[in-house]
Image: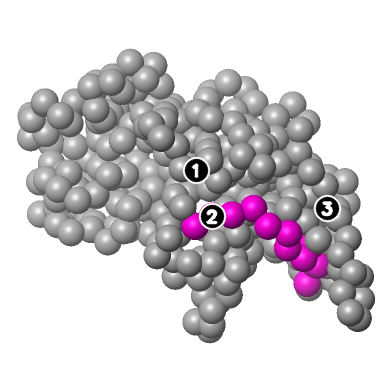
Amino acid sequence: MTAGYTVGRDEEKITMKAIVVTDQAAGMAGMKLADRPQPQAAINDVVVQIHASGFVPTELTWPSTWTDRLDRDRTPSIPGHELAGVVTALGYGTTGLSVGQRVFGLADWYRDGTLAEYVAMEARNLAPLPGDVDFTVGASLPISGLTVWQALFQHGRLQAGQSVLVHGAAGAVGSMATQLAREFGAHVIGSGRAADRKTVLDFGANEFVDLGSDALKDVGKVDLVLDGIGGEIGKRSAGLVRAGGTLVSIVGPVEARPEGGLAVDFVVESDRAQLNEIVQRVRDGRLRTNIGTVSTLDDAVAAFNPTERRSGKTIIRVRP
């Protein structure tokens, strides 16, 4: 599908197809495909024609999906914040990118997102996408890659020889955390359900913990816990962190703090240098993405409301 024109009483407006949400209580079932005005580039913005985009289901619980920075209602809003595409327009004062350039990155939490044919966003939140990296792969990298990079190296201060427990190690974030931690010389223990064992070990974990049957306390003391599950698992994990170690939660505030250690939760931020580091590792084979379902924008609502559990990250291929 391509952008079209609708004639209003006063002027002709260029529209695009997008997934919109208007009702927080409806959750993902409230997503629908609609025509929305095509965005314009503000100062320091670029407009990107989106080829592929990603979405995190928890977005629909974030205040930024429903209101702007001044807490004003901004519905109908377009969810999704990961993208790969081609720059089609530059705003006044925008530098560092050019029209026609392939890019990928992380869109602003408080602005319309990437489940659409076009997005307007600040140029600083994008990085060049090399020509040998597919748009689908590019769109799978920003949230998972940046979350892991910031969790392991900025907040977790990971060093070679340390031990890391990665919860949810078969998921999009967990599988990337496993690979990066191994590359930097850590001993990685990956957790998940029994069916995840092969996937977790294939992504490079040294050990696997079955959260359904293994005793978490038997893991012993670790230097770093990366918690992508939270709840009871997160609380029990605090007791596994050795003195001077860190529990990093990517699922909200930490409920139990490790004795003699640090507890950190954070909101991931876009960082061009980190995006460059991540995509270079994909190019040279050090990092594999964990893509599950690839769907079209027309079928996106169904893809985000599956009838059975799916593994890997769902990517929407907006342009063929």
Relative to residue 152, is residue 6 drawn left or right?
right
Q: Are marks 3 and 2 in contact (CB under 8 Å)?
A: no
In the picture, the quarter occupied by the N terminus is top right
Check contact, mark 1 vs mark 3: CB within 8 A.
Answer: no
- Viewport quadrant of the C terminus: top right
Please report the residue visible at 13 percent of the width from the left and 41 percent of the height from the top: 240
Whichever of labels 1 and 3 marks the residue nearer the N terminus, that label is: 3
Q: Image quadrant of residue 241?
A: top left
Label 3: state its secondary structure: loop
Please say whether residue 203 is one of the residues in the magenta stretch: no
- First to last magenta residue range: 30-42
Q: Which of marks 1 and 2 precedes in the sequence?
A: 2
Q: Nearer the viewer, residue 43 or 298?
A: 298
Q: Amino acid at mark 1?
A: Phe
Of residues 87 and 218, which is closer to you in this image?
87
Residue receiving disc 2: 31
Residue under label 1: 304
| Location of mark 3 (residue) | 3
**Amino acid residing under circle 3:** Ala
Is residue 86 shown above or below 291?
below
Question: Which amino acid does the dot numbered 2 rest on?
Answer: Met
Asked whether 52 or 151 is in front, the reply is: 52
